Amino acid sequence: MATKTGSGLEYKGVASISGPIIVVENVQGVGYDELVSVKTQHGETRLGKVIQVTQKAVIVQVFEGTTGLSPSDTRTRFLGHSLEVPVSTEMLGRVMNSFGEPIDGHPRFFTEEKRDVNGYPLNPVAREYPKEFIQTGISAIDGLCSLVRGQKLPVFSGPGLAHNELAAQIVRQAQIRGGGEDFNIVFIAMGLEHDDAAFFQKSFEETGAIKNVAMFLNLADDPPVERIITPRTGLTLAEFLAFDQDRHVLVVMTDMTNYCEALREVSASMEEVPSRKGYPGYMYSDLASLYERAGRIHGKKGSITQMPILTMPNDDITHPIPDLTGYITEGQIVLSRSLEKQSIYPPIYISTSLSRLMKDGIGKDSTREDHANVASQLYSAYAQYNSVKSLVTIIGEEGLGQRDKEYLRFGEAFEKTLINQGKNENRTIEQTLSIAWDALSLLPDEELTSIKPEYIKKYYPKFASEVK
Amino acid sequence: MPVKGRVIRVAGPVVEASGMAQAVMHEMVEVGNDRLIGEIIRLDGEQATIQVYQNTSGLKLDEPVLGTGSPLSVELAPGIVGNVFDGIQRPLEELKILTGAFIKHAAGVTSLSRTKKWTFVPTAKVGAKLVGGDILGTVQETALFEHRVLVPVNVQGKLLKIVPKGDYTIIETIATLEVNGAKVDLPMLQRWPVREPRPHTKRLFATSPLITGQRVIDTFFPVAKGGSASIPGPFGSGKTVTQQQLAKWSDANIIIYVGCGERGNEMVDVLDSFPQLMDPTTGHPLMERTVLVANTSNMPVSAREASIYTGITLAEYFRDMGYAVALMADSTSRWAEALREVSGRLEEMPAEEGFPSYLPSRLAEFYERTGVVETLGSDKRIGSICAIGAVSPPGGDFSEPVTQHTKRFTRVFWALDAELAAARHYPSINWMASYSGYIQDLAEWWHKNVDKNWNSYREEAMRILQTEDDLKNIVKLVGPEALPDKQRLVLETARIIRIAFLQQNALDAIDTYSSPQKQFKMLKIIVDYHRLADNVVSKGAPIFKVTELPITEEIMRMKTAIPNDKVDLLDDLEKRMYESFGMLEATLR
């Protein structure tokens, strides 16, 4: 049955087809994880990879799905290497599919180097600790969960919340303080709706950022299994740009929820033992193999900063997708429906938001000496505000003590002036901190126990004006 | 003659091989032409199921599988301390030199350097009858750590020859023993299988605390040297920061930090900060007493399973030298998940949430390797291992299997709380949900070394916190203003305990570590404050008169204002507090 063509043996016919999985029998010399070319009876070629080799058969997962394949006429060829995708600086400004092939109608790339789509794990001792502050111009992020170069900081959103606007604003505004080169953007869409993809494209075009953006699109009507490849293709380019071309790369991946759904679909079709909510037990390791591709390397100029976006099913932060993500990423930015309802943009709920790498990215040398203290005070005061607010619903504002009333006023000002800002408003960190001090000044200075007395003297509006 | 079989099935990290009739369970094997390291986890006739610790991409059927004749083992000799290994003790610095920034396959890497020379100082005398565990000599491995070279566990006999003081590699013979009439040459290098606990003479009770400098831990929920503790918490609740604080400040001789399936950047944080942090007592970099086992989440999942065993075996080796060892495992949930993943690929019947039914027994085996022991050897040294395991429960739900089973096998439970973390109350250890089973065992140490009233003060403080917890439910309904002043005082004092004592800023140079003396004095000031305030409030002083006292704010800031080497300033503070209240009381008459 086997006929020799091109680089390897071509096998005609498959033993069984189920979901995205095909089983090919009587095959020899095939390696685990090898790339497979699958030809339909109409001559269309699809790609797949070997996910299990046994003496009897080879199990292949077909990325573009198995629709239209017939057991007798399908031809498979094993390519002897794992999936490789093209990487090139020419990909900036272009739109590609999940395999890195251009789909924007423009010509193919001139130089084409191919890389293994899975990459290799970065040796922890080769990593450099990320600590360069990125100013996004968004107060809630810069002031309270600062992003640094080489960090992976996801946005936990819900269906219908303003995550796309927020991501687009970050892409437009992100910069290193004191100038420096622009970010190259790798934009990875997984199961994204056409409208959302068009929104991003338009937003990049309007600001002229598009020439620095490489877009990898797997849209909602594209095969789900392909979604498992899309982020890997994009991240392979990001690694090339960052560590071969010395660029600073910001990777936006949306929507991780669709990615995880695809993972579950494939796992179920392979009849694997499911873990929570039917997701595969290896979802943590699988997500880590994407997220951990962010970072910096000693002795290299470039960096990969990741901003994955996910929509929490039913706004539930304990759902496996946000849960496992939160355990891998260096913090999270959480959007809240209740803030959105109060017309606060961006609706970032800071109490559950966090940036783990903030501590080394801020302070005297990078932002301002009082930044860490102010952030920590804002967090605890806002927590106090939230508990006072729940008290108000029961006993009314009149029943509150003086201090609690002050917290109430602080919290309202905090949400309206610090968190809330325009979709095109780009604040410097100094502006953010000055708004923060204005909000804190609604509390008496002895309440500010997280802030060093010397900073209170210098920045608390009442004392600061005395100094002047 | 080691076996030689061939690959018949590959499914991710699980490989099956035939022709393995001579192999033994848990034997280490080399798989494929690239000689990937694996371990036999099931034998069925002449077929073996192998868990492979490296990436199996490209592995083909019929590639060879070679037995090594020994179980998965670690290398034990000078060169461990200050080093960074992956889950199967491959040195990551060496790998970086060989394969660059990204980990690729590299054959022939040994865990410990064969060429580096160490200055060995012999202490055993020729002619002495030595048994396993006796000290042959020492190597000053780092400024903080003296490596004691021991007679291997099962060897005993007369010392025929020992080398003079000098520089030797770990494979050169340093001593020769006569064992049952035969001569046995001993190098410094030894091996030990990771899944087998190293033997000791007998177990002892844990009586001294592991001082961590973290107030909520040392004062309220202490762990003993040789004890075991678990830190469960949802993401973002500060597990890793707490673990790192413990690794930095614990008064153990050796710290083994196992990063098991966690973030790469966190390991870098440890790697960057530890060489710069100085040990509070000796002034040498903390890295000189630290061993890192780093199997980050993107490294092969099966090596993650092994990393916990690698860590605890290294810990036992140092314990056997007579040291107090503290092992931090972050996170044991990732280890359990690795078990689950491999179990799933073996198509075993799953128990709770897909975890294999042997999860509890594996956890028990691990935590049972902790403890205080009298080691082997004729000089009856005392060594201990304290294990602190982080647990990452999905969705922060403590009823999940890993948290529940860990709770059964550890005596201290530090429950991290998302709500506290959201208010940036760190360490976010919930004082109502946490417990320590060592308080009675350790009280004697505190009473002898710090103050005889330690336990009565900590109990009083706990009572205040407990009362606050009860009152909180009423406050939620009626607001604090509606409470009588005496109860409002409890709320005020509890607030001081929370902010001034329980909260501790890991990033503040002074606050990051509190000596036991400082901890006790701070606690005493707060509890006495409560007694004094309670007295004046009973005599009719309104509560705001108390909270308005400048001494209150001073107490709130004492943790960062008063360094560990000036704790007598706390005595001054206490004196001024008594005076303030005296003056307040005088105005009442």
Image: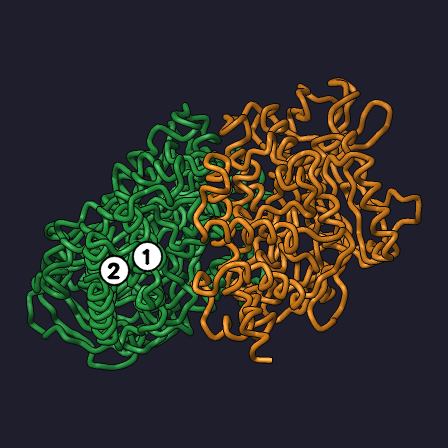
Chain colours: A orange, B green
Chain letter of the residue carrying label 1: B
Where residue B287 sits: x, y (%)? 37, 69
Chain of the residue under the numbered disc 2 shown in the image: B
Q: Can you tell which quarter of the image residue B352 is in?
A: top left
Return the residue nearer the eye: B428 or A246.
B428
Q: Is residue B222 left or right of residue B509?
A: left
Is A102 located above or below residue A92 in the figure? Answer: above
Residue labelled with disc 1: B496
User: Percent from the top left, x then y, of residue A277?
Assistant: 53, 27
Q: Mark number for residue B526?
A: 2
Residue type at mark 1: give it: Ile
Residue type, label 2: Ile
Point out the residue furthest to the right here.
A106
Mark 1–mark 2 CB contact (< 8 Å):
yes
Estimate how packed mark 2 is, as few (under 14), some (14 to 19) or many (20 or more) residues with alpha carbons within 10 Å: many
Q: Which mark is residue A110?
A: none
Q: Quadrant of residue A13?
A: top right
Q: Secondary structure at mark 1?
A: helix
**Dividing the image into 4 quarters, which one contains the N terminus of chain B?**
top left
Pick whichever, A208 or A401, lies toward us: A401
Residue in view at x 69 percent, y 38 percent = A161
